[in-house]
Image (cartoon, rainbow, N blue to C red):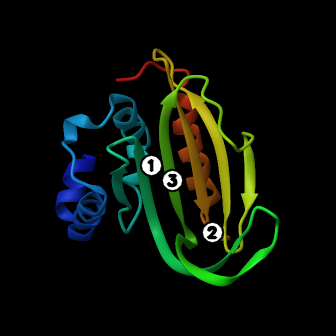
Amino acid sequence: MTLNKMRATNFFGYLFPMLVMTACGLFAADSIPNELKAVQSAIEPVLLKLDPFPQIAYLNDGGTLLVAYRTQTYKVHGKLKTGEISPETRDEMGPGYKGFILRVHLQDAGEINQAVTPQTVHEPYWQTDLDVTPLKGTKKQIYWGLSYGAQTDTQLLSNLKRKIGELKTSPLK
């Protein structure tokens, strides 16, 4: 079963991306860069094995791919640049204890990001692995973050990272 067929049979899996796209501004499916479509295709075999099926959305006019699986909303005290912890809380979507959120941002090759990569950021309720993957056969790279809960299946995380890593060694489709 293909990813599109899975989405058609899963109403919430269809509704979530539509709500996100409506909130962020509608854009045509053909405006989504082929490089991000290739990322989605690469991780599709891993996603098809999950139940419930993850929510998938394209944000920022199609420049960002978001895959969310078993998420929840947390109350988080933000950190200021000085290191001080804010007394105010904010709501933040994060992975549940067995979930993940994959954020993939398409960039020009060689673009420098604020975070040193690769690295793992330890957040209050989850961890986030950050990395950059150059896309073979293009002048693009993806800057991606994989946030996951304490009991997220380590084989699932490895499979996602492996599929993303294969994009730098295989031509894009």
- SS under mark 1: helix
Q: CA distance from mark 2 to mark 1?
A: 18 Å
- Quarter of the image where the C terminus is located: top left
Q: Is residue 87 visible?
A: yes
The residue identified by callout 3 is 102
The residue identified by callout 2 is 149
- SS under mark 3: strand
Q: Residue at x 65, y 84 (%)?
A: 88
Q: Name the kind of residue labelled 1 in the image.
A: Val
Q: CA distance from mark 1 to mark 3?
A: 13 Å
The mark lying in front, picked from 2 and 3, is 3
Measuring from the top left, give residue 17's x and y in whole percent: 28, 60
Q: Compare residues 171 and 50 and report the one nearer the observer.
A: 171
Q: CA distance from mark 2 to mark 3?
A: 12 Å
The residue identified by callout 1 is 46
Q: Name the kind of residue labelled 2 in the image.
A: Gly
